[in-house]
Image (tube, rainbow, N blue to C red):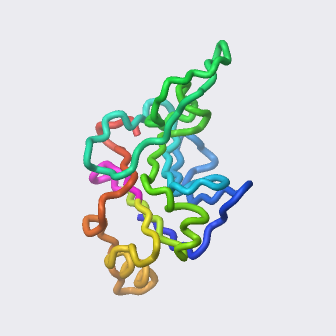
């Protein structure tokens, strides 16, 4: 479980607010998880996984996430350079997938356009959370903004994180995540 509680995040031209996990010495073999990442004036929170070949999110069941997948359109053909205008969604985590932008990865997008950047700052910030659960074979992500939208269990977990008698985060008490990624046994992720 990872979370970041923000009061303010960078926003505007030339900014790249991000909170991510990786093994830089062995990238992309050991993967990368962008818990939240944006650029410039983007206002929708996104979570991305970046991996080697074989990890895709094509079989995610309905009803496990509220978000959608990032579009991948206008990708230049590797031989001709002509843009392919076929609308596809970034469900392949492979950093060199030929039908997605270079290093796009598989990207879950929050459906609300006020979950990153200036809109979040105007609401006083928010909390971004990621659950990495190999037992249940998934990674899930949430954004709660403004702070009054953070579930009580998560508020208690954050407040007691450095205490001996701390409250454990319990995502079963939270609303559906916007991002859902299948991992572990039975997948190539």
Residue at coordinates 52% horizontally, 39% vertically from top-left? 105
Say if residue 35 shows up in the picture.
no
Query: Which residue ends up furthest to the top in the rendered image?
Result: 80
Q: Position of residue 164 (x, y in %)?
A: 39, 86
| 60, 160: nearer the viewer | 60
- Residue 148 lies, in percent from the top left, at 41, 78
Bounds of the magenta segment: 133-141
Instruction: Locate the N terminus and report the quarter of the image it occupies.
Output: bottom left
Residue 151 location, quadrant: bottom left
Q: Determine whether 42 is above or below 3 in the image.
A: above
* 99 on left or right of 163: right
In the rendered image, the quadrant that contains the C terminus is top left
Q: Is residue 156 left or right of residue 106?
A: left
Give x and y (percent) for residue 161. 43, 80
Q: Is residue 120 rendered to the left or right of residue 24?
A: left
Residue found 54% across the figure and 76% down from its top: 124
Specify whether residue 137 is painted magenta.
Answer: yes
Q: Is 107 within the magenta?
A: no
Residue drawn at the location 49% of the way across and 71% of the way down: 126
Q: Is residue 160 above or below residue 82?
A: below
């Amino acid at each position: 479980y990872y979370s970041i509680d923000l009061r303010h995040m960078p926003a505007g031209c030339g900014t790249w607010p991000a909170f991510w996990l990786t093994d830089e010495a062995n990238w992309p073999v050991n993967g990368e998880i962008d818990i939240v990442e944006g650029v410039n004036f983007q206002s929708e929170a996104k979570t991305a996984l970046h991996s080697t070949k074989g990890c895709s999110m094509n079989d995610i069941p309905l009803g496990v996430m509220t978000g959608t997948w990032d579009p991948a359109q206008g990708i230049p053909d590797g031989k001709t350079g002509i843009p392919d205008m076929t609308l596809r969604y970034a469900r392949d985590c492979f950093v060199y997938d030929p039908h997605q932008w270079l290093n796009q990865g598989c990207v879950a997008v929050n459906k609300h356009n006020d979950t990153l950047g200036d809109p979040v700052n105007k609401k006083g910030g928010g909390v971004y959370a990621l659950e990495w659960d190999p037992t249940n074979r998934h990674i899930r992500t949430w954004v709660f903004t403004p702070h009054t939208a953070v579930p009580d269990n998560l508020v208690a977990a954050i407040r007691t994180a450095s205490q001996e008698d701390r409250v454990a985060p319990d995502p079963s008490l939270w609303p559906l995540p916007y991002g859902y990624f299948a991992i572990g046994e039975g997948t190539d992720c």
